Each structure stands twice: as structure tokens, then as C-alpha cells.
Image: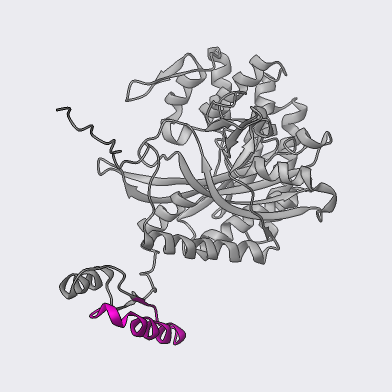
Amino acid sequence: MSKKKKSFRPKARLPRGFGDIHAHEVRTMANMIKKISEVYELYGFEPLETPALEFAECLGKFLPDADRPNEGVFALQDDDEQWMALRYDLTAPTARFVAENYDSLAKPFRRYQTGSVWRNEKPGPGRFRQFVQFDADTIGSNEMAADAELAMMWSDVMEALGIARGDYIIRMNNRKILDGVLDKINMLGDDDASVNTRLTVMRAMDKLDRLGSQGVRLLLGEGRKDESGDYTKGANLDEASIDKVIAFVEAGKATNKETLAALSQLIAGSEIGEAGIAELEEIGMLISSAGYNEDRICFDPSIVRGLGYYSGPVMEAELTFEIKDEKGRPVQFGSIGGGGRYDGLVARFKGIEIPATGISIGVSRLYAALEALGKHKASSVIPPIIILVMDKSERPAYQQMAVELRQAGIRSEVYMGSSGMKAQLKYADKRGAP
């Protein structure tokens, strides 16, 4: 007699780097997003939604690792064998939307958007492959007032969420100043090798807060091995060039004026670097005249942002209060998002330069920060009244009870299982029914 063939039973498990979100967090996060939206609306921004999938060519060379559809993103081919990828951020899809609808849009186009993004990168503690971002962008303005406004709006968002002044800071820099430093070490070539080396340098600099000066030095040189044994290839700069880059990221001073003076000395003689200084000087004048001083928005040369499409001012929101790490040591909470000017992104589609600037908040990071500060209020959603089914033949009457309760604005449900009274009462207890 032949053995009965076992049927396949899949194991219930999550892919690494992904997570489920439970009811309390969904509601609390929705409340947080509502508060952010209210600030954005106050500034005159309009909501937008774009699809999760974009053609990989629309992301192009701005993919996180290289100009290949399977590097850093989750990609697939459609029936026409065209590569599509889950969006890596919300900025590239917005650039595609603007290019596609350019003639019908009021310009400058001001939009905000929230939604999931996906990154095919190594997951780790607090590092997920799917997470939610909340962006705001101004497209069609080359005025530094647009960048200054985003920094001020971000500061307002922090305080609207209950994060006290002193527990956060908006840090700003300018990619043109960094280009001035790279100009000094002959790294502004347009060939692929130069572009890839610049991206490696920027990503190394972007890790200063996490790895410190010595860690960045290793990434600017031959490379670095992390605690898990994984090796990251470096930019292979010589020691003199590394010294200049480190001097740049450590040039921050007590005031914005002092920082700009220090940076001016580093890039003296570089036309593009001096243009970046002039842009930050204008932003500094605008924010200070509006009452946003260094305790809210400060200039910090260590902020470079790792993505390749930034072309001018860049910014990052950092939470400065302390939490405990996995080993119980006090550490600053750190960055909850970034952004900046990306004047070349829409031009890829239109063939003409269309200036743009934007910010992006990491919603999950911000949620965790508010939780650490005790800012999440207890859920105001009252659990539903449970109508027990004592006699299945009376279900129509039970449903009518539920209808009357709902019409009175009371959450209610008829028990939909098939168990007896004892199990139904246990169910009501688990639901927290009043």
C-alpha cells in the first residue's frame, strides 16, 4: 500500500527586513501623519499619490548603488520585458509625474506625499527594506527662498508633533560647497569612474555621525570592515585628499556665519564652491529674518546626503535627545529624514533644467522617536460592543441591534464565530469590549 503523499504546508514567516503593523500603531501613525499634513497644508502644499512601481529607466542613474535595475531596488520585468522597480523613494516618481504633466501644472508645483518605499539592501536593527516616507517638494523655483521655506516648515512639523526646541535641529549644507572641495582634489570629472567615486565619497561622508572621523577615513581610503565582518569598498583617495575631505566635514562652528567663514577658506578659488557659499548666505538671511535661529536651523558641513541627484542645498532633521542602545549605552536618537535641491532630476525627462527642492521624513523613525519621548497618546478609539449570538435563529434581530447602535455612533459588531457563550465572552474580553 502506497504512502499517502503529504500536502505542502508553507511556513508562516516574514521576509527579512519587513514587518507587520498592528492596530494601535496604525492608528497612532495615522494621527501623526495627519498633524504633518496640517502643517504642509498651512504652507500651501497639495497632496499627490503615485504608484508603487515605476519603470526602472525613470529611476536611471539615480538608483542607490549603480545603473542597474537589480541593484538596491526590487525589480521585475513586465509582459513587454521592460524593467520595472518598486520605488526607492518618492522623489523620482514625483519628477516623472511633473515631466508627464508639466504643461497643466501650476508652477512652482508644490506637493506632499506619503507612502511606502522599498530598498533591496541588507536589513539590520531598525533598518527595514520597506518603510514609509512623507515628502514635500517645490518644483519650478530656483529661489533659495524655496529651500529656506522647507527648512522652516520642517522645524514647524517637529514642534507641531510636540518635539521641544533643543530636542531637534534642522542641519543644512550645500552640495556646491562639497563640489568646491572635490574641485580642489580634481574629482569633478564627468566620466563614469569619477561619478561613481564621488558617490562613494559622499556616502562615506554621510556616515560621519555613525562611524566617526576614523570610520569615514577608512571609507575614503581602501575600505572598511564592519563588526559583522562585511567589507565595504572605499573610494581609494590619497592621504592629502582624505585630509581635505575630513577638514570639510569637521568645519562646523557655533554660528552659521562662523561656519560659512570657515568653509569659504576651504573652497577659496573654486567658482562652484563660492556659489554654494552665496546660496547658504541667502538662506541664512531668510531664516534668521523669520525668527528661525541656530537652535532650530544650523549650517553643518557634515550633511551631504548620499543620493546622487542632489545639486544644491541639502538638509537633514536630527533628533538630539538621548536614548539607550542595545547595550544600554546613552546615544542620540539621530536623523529622521533629509532632503535638498535636485535641479537635474526632472530635466532627464524634459531636456530642459527644471529646478526642484524637497524634504523626506522617515515616518517609522519619527514614530519611534515620539514613542521614546512619550508623545503618543493612548488610543481614543473605544473597543466595539460585542453582541453575543445566543440563538442563531435570532441573527436578524442581533443585526438590527447593531444597526441601531451604529446609527447612534457606537462601534458594535455581531459575533461572527460559531462558538458557545463562554468562548464568545472570552472573545469580548480579548477585544476589550466595554
Q: Is residue 267 left or right of residue 271?
A: left
Q: Is residue 392 magenta?
A: yes
Left or right, 120 with reference to 16: right
Measured along the vertical axis of the image, is residue 105 above or below residue 387? above
Q: Nearer the viewer, residue 65 or 231?
A: 65
Total numbered labels placed on residues in the image? 0
Residue 33, image x and y in percent? 52, 61
Q: Which percent across, then down, holds residue 179? A: 68, 27
The color scheme shown is one colour
Residue at 57% over, 57% down? 155
Judged by its main secondary structure, the magenta piece is helix
**Quadrant (top left, top right, bottom left, bottom right) of the C terminus:** bottom left
The structure residue drawn at horizontal position 37% and vertical position 35%, both measured from the top left corner, is 124
Residue 180 image position (x, y, % from top left): 69, 27
Outermost residue, front side: 1
How far from the left and from the top, in percent, is residue 233?
Answer: 48, 17
In magenta, the rendered stretch is: 389-413
Q: Quadrant of the N terminus?
A: top left
Whether 165 is among the magenta residues is no
Judge whether residue 186 can be spotted in this image. no
Quadrant of residue 90 within the rendered picture: top right
In this rendered view, identify the residue nearer to me: 420 or 425.
Answer: 420
Say which residue appears at 36% left-offset and 82% top-offset.
Answer: 396
| 32 up-or-down from 11: above or below | below
Q: Is residue 16 left or right of residue 94?
A: left
